[in-house]
Amino acid sequence: MLPDLVHARHLAQLGLLKQILDEADLATNLLEKSEAIPLHVLMAGFQEDKKGRERFLHFSFLPLNDDDIVAIQLLQIYSTLPFHLQEGARDGVAAVLLEINTRLPIGHFGINEQDELHYRYVYSISASSSFESEEVLEILSLFVYMCDMFAEHVELVASGEASAEQVVQSLR
Protein backbone atom coordinates (compact mmCIF):
# COMPACT_ATOMS: atom_id res chain seq x y z
CA MET A 1 0.00 0.00 0.00
CA LEU A 2 1.36 3.41 -0.95
CA PRO A 3 1.59 6.13 1.68
CA ASP A 4 -1.03 8.89 1.52
CA LEU A 5 1.68 11.44 0.69
CA VAL A 6 2.61 9.53 -2.47
CA HIS A 7 -1.05 9.30 -3.53
CA ALA A 8 -1.46 13.04 -2.91
CA ARG A 9 1.63 13.80 -5.03
CA HIS A 10 0.37 11.55 -7.84
CA LEU A 11 -3.04 13.25 -7.76
CA ALA A 12 -1.42 16.69 -7.92
CA GLN A 13 0.79 15.63 -10.84
CA LEU A 14 -2.15 14.14 -12.72
CA GLY A 15 -3.94 17.45 -12.12
CA LEU A 16 -1.04 19.28 -13.78
CA LEU A 17 -1.09 16.79 -16.65
CA LYS A 18 -4.85 17.39 -16.96
CA GLN A 19 -4.20 21.14 -17.36
CA ILE A 20 -1.66 20.48 -20.12
CA LEU A 21 -4.08 18.19 -21.97
CA ASP A 22 -7.00 20.60 -21.47
CA GLU A 23 -4.90 23.38 -23.02
CA ALA A 24 -4.25 21.05 -25.97
CA ASP A 25 -8.05 20.76 -26.39
CA LEU A 26 -8.31 17.14 -25.28
CA ALA A 27 -11.35 16.17 -23.24
CA THR A 28 -10.15 14.89 -19.85
CA ASN A 29 -11.55 13.32 -16.71
CA LEU A 30 -9.55 12.83 -13.51
CA LEU A 31 -10.77 9.89 -11.44
CA GLU A 32 -9.57 9.81 -7.86
CA LYS A 33 -8.54 6.62 -6.12
CA SER A 34 -11.48 4.84 -4.49
CA GLU A 35 -12.63 1.40 -3.46
CA ALA A 36 -13.42 0.69 -7.11
CA ILE A 37 -10.23 2.28 -8.52
CA PRO A 38 -6.98 1.46 -6.67
CA LEU A 39 -5.00 4.36 -8.21
CA HIS A 40 -5.76 7.86 -9.47
CA VAL A 41 -6.43 7.74 -13.23
CA LEU A 42 -6.53 10.56 -15.75
CA MET A 43 -8.53 9.73 -18.86
CA ALA A 44 -8.28 11.72 -22.07
CA GLY A 45 -10.03 11.34 -25.39
CA PHE A 46 -7.86 11.61 -28.46
CA GLN A 47 -8.49 11.62 -32.18
CA GLU A 48 -10.77 8.95 -33.57
CA ASP A 49 -9.15 6.17 -35.57
CA LYS A 50 -9.50 5.92 -39.36
CA LYS A 51 -12.83 4.13 -38.94
CA GLY A 52 -14.24 6.92 -36.75
CA ARG A 53 -14.07 4.98 -33.48
CA GLU A 54 -13.43 6.85 -30.24
CA ARG A 55 -10.17 6.23 -28.43
CA PHE A 56 -9.05 7.09 -24.93
CA LEU A 57 -5.75 7.44 -23.12
CA HIS A 58 -5.45 6.38 -19.50
CA PHE A 59 -2.66 7.85 -17.37
CA SER A 60 -1.71 6.45 -13.97
CA PHE A 61 1.41 6.27 -11.87
CA LEU A 62 2.65 2.75 -11.29
CA PRO A 63 3.08 2.06 -7.60
CA LEU A 64 6.70 1.79 -6.48
CA ASN A 65 6.79 0.43 -2.96
CA ASP A 66 10.53 -0.07 -3.01
CA ASP A 67 12.37 2.43 -0.80
CA ASP A 68 15.38 2.15 -3.12
CA ILE A 69 13.48 3.75 -6.02
CA VAL A 70 13.09 7.37 -4.99
CA ALA A 71 14.55 9.34 -7.92
CA ILE A 72 12.01 8.36 -10.56
CA GLN A 73 8.29 7.84 -11.04
CA LEU A 74 6.70 5.65 -13.66
CA LEU A 75 3.71 7.08 -15.52
CA GLN A 76 1.77 4.50 -17.50
CA ILE A 77 0.07 5.67 -20.68
CA TYR A 78 -2.44 3.05 -21.80
CA SER A 79 -5.00 2.80 -24.56
CA THR A 80 -7.37 -0.07 -25.27
CA LEU A 81 -7.65 -0.59 -29.02
CA PRO A 82 -11.19 0.05 -30.36
CA PHE A 83 -11.74 -3.41 -31.82
CA HIS A 84 -12.11 -6.96 -30.54
CA LEU A 85 -10.18 -10.16 -30.85
CA GLN A 86 -12.11 -12.75 -32.86
CA GLU A 87 -12.32 -16.22 -31.33
CA GLY A 88 -9.32 -18.32 -32.35
CA ALA A 89 -7.22 -15.34 -33.45
CA ARG A 90 -5.14 -14.92 -30.27
CA ASP A 91 -2.09 -16.90 -31.43
CA GLY A 92 -1.96 -15.11 -34.78
CA VAL A 93 -2.33 -11.71 -33.12
CA ALA A 94 0.40 -12.63 -30.63
CA ALA A 95 2.75 -13.42 -33.53
CA VAL A 96 1.97 -10.09 -35.18
CA LEU A 97 2.42 -8.22 -31.89
CA LEU A 98 5.84 -9.80 -31.45
CA GLU A 99 6.84 -8.63 -34.92
CA ILE A 100 5.45 -5.12 -34.39
CA ASN A 101 6.91 -4.66 -30.91
CA THR A 102 10.44 -5.10 -32.27
CA ARG A 103 9.89 -1.99 -34.43
CA LEU A 104 8.52 0.39 -31.80
CA PRO A 105 10.70 3.17 -30.38
CA ILE A 106 8.38 3.47 -27.35
CA GLY A 107 5.78 1.25 -25.77
CA HIS A 108 4.35 -2.08 -26.79
CA PHE A 109 1.14 -3.68 -27.99
CA GLY A 110 -0.34 -6.48 -25.93
CA ILE A 111 -3.32 -8.67 -25.09
CA ASN A 112 -4.63 -8.87 -21.54
CA GLU A 113 -6.38 -11.75 -19.78
CA GLN A 114 -9.79 -10.54 -21.03
CA ASP A 115 -8.53 -10.64 -24.64
CA GLU A 116 -8.52 -6.84 -24.86
CA LEU A 117 -5.88 -5.44 -27.16
CA HIS A 118 -3.94 -2.41 -25.98
CA TYR A 119 -1.00 -0.14 -26.58
CA ARG A 120 1.00 0.81 -23.48
CA TYR A 121 4.02 2.95 -22.67
CA VAL A 122 5.64 3.47 -19.28
CA TYR A 123 7.20 6.91 -19.12
CA SER A 124 9.99 7.36 -16.57
CA ILE A 125 10.07 10.85 -15.07
CA SER A 126 12.16 12.43 -12.36
CA ALA A 127 10.52 12.39 -8.95
CA SER A 128 11.91 15.89 -8.35
CA SER A 129 10.37 17.61 -11.36
CA SER A 130 6.92 18.22 -12.79
CA PHE A 131 5.57 17.80 -16.29
CA GLU A 132 6.67 20.14 -19.05
CA SER A 133 3.97 20.81 -21.61
CA GLU A 134 6.14 20.50 -24.72
CA GLU A 135 7.72 17.22 -23.58
CA VAL A 136 4.36 15.67 -22.64
CA LEU A 137 2.76 16.67 -25.94
CA GLU A 138 5.69 15.26 -27.95
CA ILE A 139 5.50 11.95 -26.06
CA LEU A 140 1.74 11.79 -26.67
CA SER A 141 2.21 12.66 -30.33
CA LEU A 142 4.70 9.80 -30.70
CA PHE A 143 2.39 7.46 -28.74
CA VAL A 144 -0.57 8.24 -31.01
CA TYR A 145 1.60 7.96 -34.13
CA MET A 146 2.84 4.49 -33.12
CA CYS A 147 -0.69 3.42 -32.26
CA ASP A 148 -1.98 4.65 -35.61
CA MET A 149 0.92 3.17 -37.53
CA PHE A 150 0.45 -0.40 -36.30
CA ALA A 151 -3.08 -0.86 -34.91
CA GLU A 152 -4.45 -1.44 -38.42
CA HIS A 153 -2.11 -4.41 -38.86
CA VAL A 154 -3.22 -5.86 -35.53
CA GLU A 155 -6.88 -5.44 -36.45
CA LEU A 156 -6.46 -7.29 -39.75
CA VAL A 157 -5.44 -10.43 -37.85
CA ALA A 158 -7.71 -9.86 -34.83
CA SER A 159 -10.76 -9.65 -37.14
CA GLY A 160 -9.74 -12.60 -39.29
CA GLU A 161 -9.39 -10.43 -42.42
CA ALA A 162 -5.77 -11.53 -42.88
CA SER A 163 -3.50 -14.23 -41.56
CA ALA A 164 -0.61 -13.48 -39.24
CA GLU A 165 1.79 -14.65 -41.96
CA GLN A 166 0.33 -12.18 -44.48
CA VAL A 167 0.60 -9.27 -42.06
CA VAL A 168 4.11 -10.20 -40.91
CA GLN A 169 5.21 -10.35 -44.56
CA SER A 170 3.70 -6.92 -45.23
CA LEU A 171 5.68 -5.51 -42.30
CA ARG A 172 9.00 -6.79 -43.63
Image (cartoon, rainbow, N blue to C red):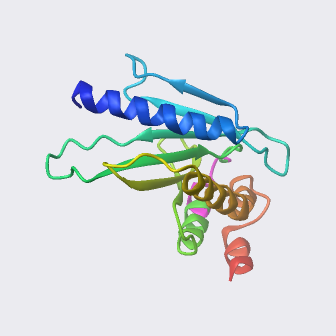
Point out the image quarter for the C terminus.
Answer: bottom right
Question: Residue 46, relative to residue 92: is it above or below?
Answer: above
Q: In which quarter of the image is residue 83?
A: top right
Left or right position of 16 against 10: right
Residue 102 or residue 29, whichever sits in front? 29
Q: Which residue lies furthest to the left in this view?
A: 67
Residue drawn at x 42%, y 23% is 37
Please determine whether, in this image, residue 107 is positioned above or below residue 52: below
The residue nearer to you, when weighing 82 against 128, is: 128
Residue 149 percent across, percent down from the top left: 72, 64
Q: Give the range drawn in magenta.
A: 86-92
Q: In this view, does 169 lie to the left or right of 161?
A: left
For image coordinates 43% across by 36% down, the residue present is 13
Residue lying at 54% horizontally and 26% vertically, measured from the top left: 30
Asked if residue 139 is among those painted magenta in the image, a careful observer would answer: no
Relative to residue 32, is residue 149 drawn left or right? right
Total labels drawn: 0
- The residue located at (42%, 46%) in the rendering is 130
Quarter occupied by the N terminus: top left
Q: In the orientation shown, which residue stands out farthest toward the bottom?
A: 172
Give the quadrant of residue 20.
Answer: top right
Left or right of 129, for residue 54: right
Outermost residue toward the top in this view: 35
Q: Position of residue 36 (x, y in %)?
A: 42, 18
Measuring from the top left, give residue 152's x and y in whole percent: 75, 59
Q: Position of residue 171 (x, y in %)?
A: 70, 77
